[in-house]
């Protein structure tokens, strides 16, 4: 095993009250690290200042990466860890490695025999699922669906079909396209399909409702620009 | 909306150091409640005493339920919530509503227009997935697989086939059958399939490794009686 470790650092889903969603022990580890691999440097710095107004940003190294970062560059990121320095992996919101490029770094760590330590924190996907009342014994997370209307309709029909045997189907959309996603779901899916719309999870204004498509059509929600997770079954 | 709310209360995965996995704000809400729907009364009481040695157990009402509890009984559980009392829903470990009967109560809450508030905490399934380096953009949780050897082998083959298009497949086993599960996976799956075995997540002795089936065959792990989550891809 390498001398350094990689901590998978959860961040808030936008909350200022970080003590409501991040455990004390996780905050302590996060504050102690001086090397981070991040999705976005500015939001990483903002989060570290939120949880510690005296966080020594200038003494801290940030490595920014995306789904386009090559394998050799990722391996280079991990050199200081191999030499004994601990690293934190952070996403823009929630847990790293879900619906973001974090898995690239973690799989490289496994190849290099670097220990990976997951820290507990908020996941909008799982918090939505458990609040939906839909099937927590069997579910699929599908990430982002296609943007083009015809492809999106086809994807929704296919998810609805797969959910008929009781498997909950979770998916997301970029917030500014949420309203168009709602329109697509309500026009494509069947009256009796259950739909959970979970908006602003763990934030002020949190709203989580599960109803049939027929009921939603009579109460079309207004969720544009608000982070939302969808589940159908 | 009903006057009372249902809080989805996370509990530790067995940790004594609850501050490492449960946020301060979640501990405060948990300590304030006097009505709980639980999977197991004894472990619920034990957890409440762990996070608050003076917790007033005698002034607290516990409703125990399982996957066999009928819909009318569940509705009856929710009557005090309808009248304005807040309730906590707790599983034996981790988040309620994942791999446990919690969804029965939550779906009844949605029908009765009772507000459901998810609280952030540890999920062995999601913490395993993000630590595995496998696909966090697209994954399925399959719960428990069949116990009979022939059916289990068939289920594993089918999961392996579905994972070939890049969708990570997560599943669990009852701890005392873990070793038999490992034997089945190593005999059924192909050499180049990636397998993550995550044992004792967030606990002392935590061990998370992702390797090919061929590599695991040369390093068969000893995980009997230890809580474990498996991911293949």
Image (cartoon, coloured by chain):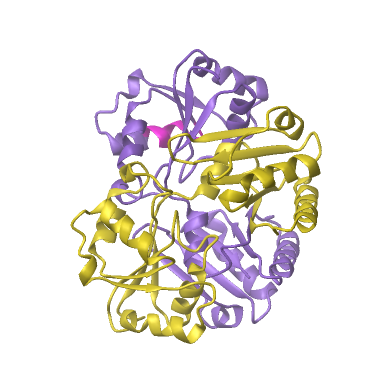
Chain colours: A yellow, B purple
Residue located 34% across and 20% down the image = B58
Q: Is residue B23 left or right of residue B1?
A: left
Residue B20 is a magenta residue: no
Prevalent SS, magenta region: helix
Q: Say if B204 sits above or below B190 in the image.
A: above
User: Which quadrant is the C terminus of chain A positioned in?
Assistant: top right
Residue located 39% across and 50% down the image = A12
Residue located 44% across and 17% down the image = B85
Q: Is residue B19 left or right of residue B141?
A: left
Residue B29 image point, x, y percent:
35, 31
- The quarter holding residue B43 reads top left
Residue A227 at least partly seen: yes
**Image mark count:** 0
Q: Say if B79 sits above or below B150 in the image.
A: above
Which residue is at the front of the view, B112 or A41? Answer: A41
**Outermost residue toward the top in this view:** B83
Residue A91 image point, x, y percent:
44, 61
Residue B100 at least partly seen: no
Which residue is at the front of the view, A12 or B180? Answer: A12
- The quarter holding residue B59 reads top left
Residue B150 image point, x, y percent:
75, 63
User: Which quadrant is the N terminus of chain A positioned in?
Assistant: bottom left
Which residue is at the front of the view, A177 or A9? Answer: A177
Q: Say if B54 sits above or below A21 in the image.
A: above
Q: Which residues are magenta?
A: B38-45
Q: Is residue A53 left or right of residue B123?
A: left
């Amino acid at each position: 095993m390498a001398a350094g470790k990689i901590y998978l650092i959860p961040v808030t889903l936008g909350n200022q009250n970080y003590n409501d969603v991040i455990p004390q022990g996780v905050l302590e580890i996060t504050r102690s690290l001086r090397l981070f691999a991040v999705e976005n440097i500015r939001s990483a710095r903002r989060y570290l200042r939120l949880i510690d107004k005296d966080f020594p940003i200038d003494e801290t190294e940030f490595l920014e990466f995306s789904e386009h970062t090559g394998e050799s560059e990722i391996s280079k990121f991990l050199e200081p860890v191999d030499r004994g320095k601990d690293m934190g992996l952070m996403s823009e919101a929630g847990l790293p490695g879900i619906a973001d490029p974090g898995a690239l770094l973690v799989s490289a760590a496994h190849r290099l025999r670097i220990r990976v330590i997951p820290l507990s924190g908020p996941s909008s996907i799982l918090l939505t699922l458990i609040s939906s009342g839909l099937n927590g014994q069997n579910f699929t997370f599908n990430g982002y669906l296609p943007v083009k209307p015809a492809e999106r309709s086809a994807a929704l029909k296919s998810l609805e079909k797969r959910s008929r045997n009781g498997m909950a189907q979770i998916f997301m959309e970029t917030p500014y396209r949420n309203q168009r996603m709602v329109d697509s779901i309500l026009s494509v899916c069947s009256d009796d399909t259950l739909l959970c719309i979970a908006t602003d999870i763990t934030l002020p204004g949190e709203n989580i409702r599960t109803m049939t498509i027929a009921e939603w059509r009579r109460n079309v929600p207004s969720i544009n620009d608000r982070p939302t997770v969808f589940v159908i079954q």
